[in-house]
């Protein structure tokens, strides 16, 4: 059992609400308890939940307890939640770290057991859903987990700008692509702080920058605490043009809303489809000089950066509305919820 799996299972034993982000974004937030609403699910295993009388929801991974829960599901009442591409060609062409891609492919190798049970595929977009071929599907957007309520941290932007790169190790190549912009920005503004969570996987050219505060990758329960406690002025979401990136959901925009940052995104899906440039975020092309220009502009205009951050939170509330996601789930679960609804 790998270190990450041990950390996830330890979190379950410690009573953590979710051990992987997929569970929080797509299941627990929309279907769990909320003000004025009873929960529609109960935990069955580390990565599975029961919904009503006869439905089971499995999230990405599985242990023996999850397998037992799935085997008890009624015909047609099994839902499999996945939010990434899992199959070989897209992974090999995406520049992911080799061991990261290998881990995804290993997970895909265990899918036969799942797919033989004819699940409804639950995914954030058609690209992810369609990788499994012609099957029943349910597209559910990720739900906003938390949002910054006050933006007085922008009062300190002119003194020490804080820039966040909240991506996991799958984003290492994306961050490396804009490294020249971060190097140039660090030379011009040596007081900035660039926060990353990549540990030993930080791109080599960024390790030499005194402006970078690089922390180790955190298990999801701990990372959520960081999102709740930390505040940044700007947050970056670069995406190279790869098949894997083309299937991503907009969860980074939701993370940026949590830390109260003005979002700067690659000018491609999913962000180009939802961000209004200059209103609720900024878009930049693949040329690092575009990223540098955008970052310089944000540092020079604290009031404008704050406005982008505030509007970015409003955008995150709209696209990440958990009530909307809950309605999609309720329609799909149908009769399974008859006793839950009373």
Image (cartoon, rainbow, N blue to C red):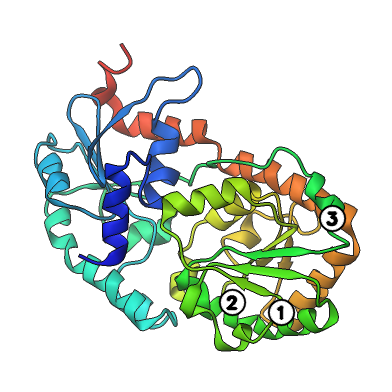
Gap between marks 2 and 3 measured at Cα: 25 Å
> In terms of depth relative to the viewer, which is nearer, 342 or 199?
199
Name the spot of residue 323 as percent of width and height, x first: 50, 30
Q: First in sequence, mark 2 or 1: give its number.
A: 2
**Residue with the mark numbered 2:** 175
- Left or right of 336? Residue 137 is right
**Residue with the mark numbered 1:** 182
- Left or right of 202? Residue 159 is right
Which image quarter holds the N terminus? bottom left
Which image quarter holds the C terminus? top left
**In the rendered image, the vertical position of residue 15 relative to residue 306, given as above or below:** above
Locate residue 151: give its quadrant.
top right
SS class, disc 2: helix
Name the spot of residue 150 as percent of width and height, x first: 75, 39
Give the mark count.
3
Gap between marks 2 and 1 measured at Cα: 9 Å
User: Mark 2, mark 3: which one is toward the viewer?
Assistant: 3
What residue is drawn where x is 32% and y is 34%? Answer: 332
- Check residue 170 in the rendering and tell me which mark sits there, or answer none: none
- Left or right of 279? Residue 129 is left
**Residue with the mark numbered 3:** 156
Q: First in sequence, mark 2 or 3: give its number.
A: 3
What residue is drawn where x is 37% and y is 34%? Answer: 329
Mark yes or no: residue 124 visible: no
What residue is drawn where x is 16% and y is 49%? Answer: 118
Mark yes or no: residue 251 visible: yes
Name the spot of residue 98 as percent of width and height, x first: 35, 83
Residue reaching furthest to the top:
342
Name the spot of residue 74 as percent of width and height, x first: 12, 34
SS class, disc 3: helix
């Amino acid at each position: 059992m790998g270190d990450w799996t041990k950390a996830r299972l330890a979190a379950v034993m410690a009573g953590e609400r979710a051990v992987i982000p997929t569970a929080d974004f797509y299941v627990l937030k929309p279907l769990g308890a909320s003000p004025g609403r009873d929960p529609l699910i109960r935990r069955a295993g580390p990565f599975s939940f029961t919904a009503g009388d006869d439905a089971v929801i499995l999230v990405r991974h599985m242990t023996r307890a999850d397998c037992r829960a799935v085997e008890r599901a009624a015909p047609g009442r099994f839902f499999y939640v996945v939010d990434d591409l899992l199959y070989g060609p897209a992974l090999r062409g995406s520049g992911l770290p080799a061991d990261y891609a290998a881990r995804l492919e290993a997970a895909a190798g265990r899918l036969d057991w799942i797919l033989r049970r004819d699940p409804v595929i639950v995914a954030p977009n058609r690209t992810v859903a369609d990788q499994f071929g012609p099957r029943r599907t349910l597209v559910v957007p990720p739900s906003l987990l938390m949002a910054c309520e006050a933006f007085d941290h922008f009062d300190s932007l002119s003194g020490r700008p804080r820039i966040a790169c909240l991506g996991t190790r799958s984003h290492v190549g994306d961050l490396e692509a804009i490294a020249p912009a971060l190097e140039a920005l660090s030379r011009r503004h040596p007081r900035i702080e660039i926060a990353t969570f990549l540990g030993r996987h930080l791109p080599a050219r960024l390790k030499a920058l005194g402006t970078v505060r690089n922390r180790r990758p955190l298990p999801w329960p701990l990372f959520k605490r960081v999102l709740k406690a930390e505040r940044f002025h700007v947050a970056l979401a670069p995406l190279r043009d790869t098949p894997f990136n083309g299937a991503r959901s907009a969860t980074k925009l939701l993370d940026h809303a949590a830390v109260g940052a003005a979002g700067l995104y690659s000018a491609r899906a999913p962000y180009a489809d939802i961000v209004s440039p200059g209103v609720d975020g900024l878009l930049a092309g693949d040329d690092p000089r575009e990223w540098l220009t955008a970052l310089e502009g944000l540092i020079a205009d604290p009031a404008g950066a704050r406005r982008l951050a505030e509007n970015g939170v409003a955008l995150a509330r709209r696209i990440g509305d958990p009530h909307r996601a809950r309605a999609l789930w309720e329609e799909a679960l149908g009769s399974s919820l008859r006793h839950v609804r009373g």
